[in-house]
Amino acid sequence: MSRLIDIDELADYLKLKKQTIYNWLNQRKISGIKVGGVWRFDRKDIDNWLRSKKRESITPAQGDNS
């Protein structure tokens, strides 16, 4: 397991508000570990999740007939 980061570090890394991350946790879009009442995130898991989203969002341009 790589170094765990807290929600402040994750929000800074993703350039998001902490509330968005809490919402994603609640919606099970991302996973985390709750340690002593504080959410922690594995940076490798977050990076893998980001890569998987990148692949899902790539679509051919409109009018592309290839």
Image: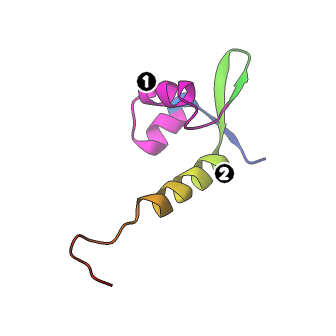
Q: Quadrant of residue 42?
A: top right
Whole-percent x, y for residue 15 in the image: 39, 41
Residue segment shown in magenta: 9-32
In the current view of this chain or complex, which residue is farthest to the top?
A: 37
Disc 1 vs disc 2: Cβ atoms closer than 8 Å?
Answer: no
Q: Which residue is mark 1?
A: 19
In the visual, does 1 lie left or right of 53? right
Placement of 28 over or under 60, stated as above or below: above
Q: Which residue is rendered at x = 23% and y = 70% of the image?
A: 62
The amino acid type found where label 2 is placed reads Lys
In what quadrant of the picture does the C terminus appear?
bottom left
Within 10 Å of the Cα at label 2, are there few (<14), some (14-19), or many (20+) other Cα atoms? few
Image height of 17 relative to 55, above or below? above
- Secondary element under disc 1, as helix, strand or loop, is helix
Residue closest to the eye, 11 or 62: 62
Residue 27's place in the image compared with 46, above or below, is above
Q: Is residue 15 left or right of residue 23?
A: left
Which residue corresponds to the image point at 47% horizontal and 25% vertical from the top-left? 23
The mark that comes first in sequence, 1 or 2, is: 1
